[in-house]
Amino acid sequence: MADKLIITAALTGAITIPTQSDKLPYTSEQLVADAVACVKAGAAAVHIHARNPETGQPSSDPDLFAPILAGIRASGVDMIVGTTTGGGMGMLPTERLRVVPRYKPEVASFNLGSMNFSIHPVARRFKPEDYRFGWEQAYAEGTKDFIFRNTFGDMETFAKTMAEHNTKPEFEAYDVGHLYNLRFLLKEKLVQPPFWIQFVLGVLGGLAATPEDLIVMKQTADRLFGAENYRWSVIGVGYPMEFNMAGMAAMMGGHVRVGLEDNIFVGRRQLATNAQLVEKAVRIAREFDRELATPEEARGMLGLKGSAAVNF
């Protein structure tokens, strides 16, 4: 029997721009409300980025995480809260990592390699006068020359910092080579199984979100680590890839991430809220007879330290 299915909601990210959707949350109040709504809809975990609350611009300022994390805690709704260490364009790895020692989250993203990472085709969809904020056009166009830095030196620092604060790495693998990077970190005794791996498919610069690519990632991880030594989830970037991948994960025994960080549509040309994306993932899970994991059940499955041990 497959595990109960863990749904993670990635609420805002650092790559979706506000002009793409008026439903994208970026103030602390909006992010807290979306986190609560997603958990009530069926998510066990939320993945948090911070943004400037006035302009919606992605930020690695750890102070901006404070009202989001405190608001989630004050809501009284239990959930696994994961923070990003991926940040966004222009942020140094040392800046991206600051949230871990400060807030000691149960889980934090851990990117497994440097890569091209671009949304520059998005900029072609809008005229200059269409953008809501002055930073957006240059940001989207600038990703054409963006290299998402995650060197082996960076990864060593991330691994040691997360271990020190008992924060579970959520390994993000955008390509097959990233899984080999994880195997190297294992050989160096910088990380230990069981692993929690997100297969991130559909980013321009990484593998596509196709059935063939997902199967290759799963088969490679099985061969490198043994199926008993990791759990996996899939991120399908864009529509309809988010839900195609969710269906495959539900069928194959994996887990699912949805949210406006990765996809803004719940149907063709139908802009979605985060909660609506979770609700659709729940419907897909039910079609495959996958029961949903509660936050507490997901903690047990992933070996997390619990919400009492975080610093927010």
Image: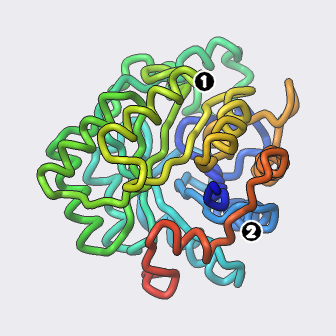
Looking at the rendered image, the quarter that the N terminus falls into is bottom right
Q: Which of the 4 quarters of the picture holds residue 140?
A: top right
* Residue occupying image coordinates x 63% and y 55%: 2
Q: Is residue 142 above or below residue 198?
A: above
* Residue occupying image coordinates x 70% and y 61%: 43
Residues 211 and 93: in front is: 211
* Residue occupying image coordinates x 60% and y 24%: 211
Question: Visible in this render: residue 263?
Answer: no
Residues 87 and 309: in front is: 309
Label 1's element?
helix
Residues 134 and 118: in front is: 118
Sequence-wise, the earlier of marks 1 and 2 is 2
Q: Position of residue 38 (x, y in %)?
A: 75, 60
Is residue 265 toward the left or the right of residue 270 in the image? left
Work out which residue is located at the far left of the displayed protein and give it.
188
Q: Which of the 4 quarters of the picture holds residue 127?
A: top right
Q: Position of residue 218 (x, y in %)?
A: 46, 36
- Count of numbered labels shown in the rendering: 2
Q: Position of residue 70 (x, y in %)?
A: 58, 78
Kind of residue at badge 2 = Val
Q: CA distance from mark 1 to mark 2?
A: 32 Å
* Residue occupying image coordinates x 55% and y 52%: 51
Kind of residue at badge 1 = Pro
Q: Is residue 98 above or below residue 253?
A: below
Question: Visible in this render: residue 307?
Answer: yes
Say few, some or many: other residues with alpha carbon within 10 Å of mark 2 (under 14 / 14 to 19 / 20 or more): many
Tag 1–tag 2 contact (CB < 8 Å): no
What residue is disc 2 on? Answer: 36
Q: Position of residue 230 (x, y in %)?
A: 41, 53
Label 2's element?
helix
What residue is disc 1 on? Answer: 211
